[in-house]
Amino acid sequence: MGGEATAYRRRLDRLLERLPHLGVDAILFFEMNNIRYLTGFTGSDGVFILRSDNGVLLVDGRYTTQAGEEAPQCEVVQYRDKIGGIVSVLGEKEVKRAGFEAAAISVEFHEKLRGKLAPGMLIPLTEALTGLRSVKDGQEVLLLRRAVDIATDALWQVIEEMRPGVEERTIALEMDYRMRALGSEETSFPTIVASGLNAALPHAHPGPRKLEDGDAVVMDFGAVHAGYRSDETCTFVLGRADKKFREVYSIVKDAHDRAIEAVRAGAACREIDRIARQVIEKKGYGQHFSHGTGHGVGLDVHEAPRLSALSDQVLEAGMVVTIEPGIYLPGHWGIRIEDMVLVKDDGCDILTKISKELKII
Amino acid sequence: MGGEATAYRRRLDRLLERLPHLGVDAILFFEMNNIRYLTGFTGSDGVFILRSDNGVLLVDGRYTTQAGEEAPQCEVVQYRDKIGGIVSVLGEKEVKRAGFEAAAISVEFHEKLRGKLAPGMLIPLTEALTGLRSVKDGQEVLLLRRAVDIATDALWQVIEEMRPGVEERTIALEMDYRMRALGSEETSFPTIVASGLNAALPHAHPGPRKLEDGDAVVMDFGAVHAGYRSDETCTFVLGRADKKFREVYSIVKDAHDRAIEAVRAGAACREIDRIARQVIEKKGYGQHFSHGTGHGVGLDVHEAPRLSALSDQVLEAGMVVTIEPGIYLPGHWGIRIEDMVLVKDDGCDILTKISKELKII
């Protein structure tokens, strides 16, 4: 627990250093995963007000006890009405300019809050907070590794049930069930099991289609441990893989491997995307790789940084990102291969455990 | 399908009638369940622009085919950039004043969109859209009944497994698994299984506590069918119930029954809350009934109207609401009893199936 309290202190200190540059003397946090990251509070609703001298965690009556236990380093204030609570704390602490997460509150809430405060007091913050959680500390990496372990163990169990005649949605349900039975708090995101023609849809929902001999099966899945999420994609083949499939699989695998080889602190995110994309484009499948190469993962399954052609972010040691190139051939099948990697000064560690060599089951 | 298209047309027509009163010539919808309600589109992202002469559904490339299939009555426009897409459609259709769901978009998104449009063009709408989905049509009631059936069947299976020594989280996992195996698309909300001391916490998460003989077990659960959600709470007792528990159970049951007897079109929501609350207050447990008496349920598990002391809504025929009084005794146990009811002109139909007489298992 001592170590954790230090981690929260460190996270706050890093932000506090930036307050003067942001031109504010407080920041209002509404995004629950940011609040969890900064305080340890895991409730579903609340506000965190960061001030130069302290942090105030505002919660409703359901969470007063829990907030006190989870965030003993914070002053906990209970509100009946969220806006009233914020106004009262800002007044008490004589805050003059309060930054807020402009992506996390609605226009309606903002209008109501603004109406109760001095004009110009609320300062929208956007890019300034984007990378707040992107560099993970050692404890966070351990939690991510534990989430990966749970998902891996579940997959090994479920792979036994993947045979012709079983419905996609049954595989997805079994995967979700086993991840939770093994300790996952929930699923990291809705599990994808896409077989045959459906594998050509990057965002397919598992449905009643029955697996058939020769099918490609794209499985995209993740577990959650202490709030931290894993994200991994395997593409298996049932029974036999033809020449074309083997060829395209090796292209996606090559794109995946080349991108991972390029991951290191200081590399531009768009450069990682370019490397994966170039492998696929050179083989003539460029238009069939219809999404970015990866994204950060942590308390949210999609968080900063973004590894795409449009990204202007740079990798830093401690970031955890996915590398997930794919080729989708409409009317035929699709292949996606995804690992989670931890960025290091001189390269990266692959956090996921399952080999991405072609596996015929 | 013909019937469904008519339902969407009817929903749009009802809104179109109100456009002049709202002082706008178009409404931008961002809330995905409102878009689903108005168009039939079930994707995870998109925008719906309602105009006096037509409806335009804007989606990204993932959803173009699906939108065309699910919402054939709409003009479907594919965007690469959401804001660019909106700006282009508004310009093309010569919209002058566009209302928008002020509770559904962030300050950041609003700022970006506003910057690309003529000044004063975006008009925030709040209360005007609150009750959009609260009155259900016959088809919606059928879907809700189907969700209830799934949840009921799952509960009967799980009840067999509720015995001393089984962990709360195992019961919750089995419940979620069986609901999905019986056809539920997902769980309506995180299932609550709160036993013994935990039953005194209205929002307990199922944890490692093992059921014990004599425990109260509060189970709050729901299934999802075609997007429509059920919501029900049963409080069971394991093995034996003492005198005090029976007494408090009958108070909660009485509050529940009295409230249901009062439900009819024209009744004030706050009056229903008052009736349930008064039963509990008269017996001296007023401070232990710490939440509202109920809420609307449909595509969202919590939607308008709200049955609380603060509500100024009035029940209408076709609304579906929960009635869920509870008494929570910290350090002892808690009891909540919840049914879903369909409001009618002269009373209501109870949609949930499980008897709320005290059940000892």
Image (spheres, coloured by chain):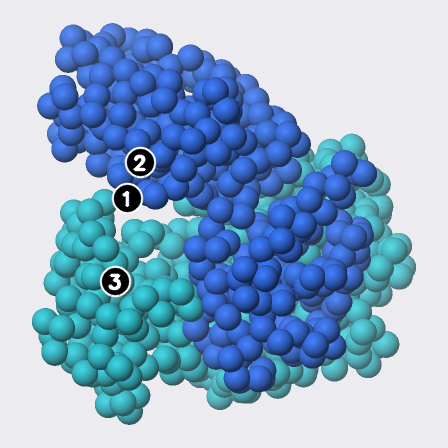
Chain colours: A cyan, B blue
The residue carrying mark 3 is A83
Q: Does residue A20 sit above or below B192 in this rendering?
A: below
Q: Quadrant of the C terminus of chain A?
A: top right
Host chain of mark 2? B
Mark 3–mark 2 distance (CA, rounded to whole Å): 23 Å
Q: Are marks 3 and 2 in contact (CB under 8 Å)?
A: no
Q: Residue at x 34, y 43 (%)?
A: B312
Depth check, front residue: A202 or B298 = B298
Mark 3–mark 1 distance (CA, rounded to whole Å): 16 Å
Q: Quadrant of the N terminus of chain A?
A: bottom left
Disc number placed over residue B270 in the picture, else none: 2
Q: Residue at x 68, y 82 (%)?
A: A275
Q: Amino acid at mark 3?
A: Ile
Q: Secondary structure beneath disc 1?
A: loop
Depth check, front residue: B325 or A199 = B325
Looking at the rendered structure, whether the residues under marks 3 and 2 are on a common chain is answered as no
Q: Amino acid at mark 2?
A: Arg
Give the x, y percent position of residue A34: 34, 66
Disc number placed over residue B310 in the picture, else none: 1
Mark 2–mark 1 distance (CA, rounded to whole Å): 7 Å
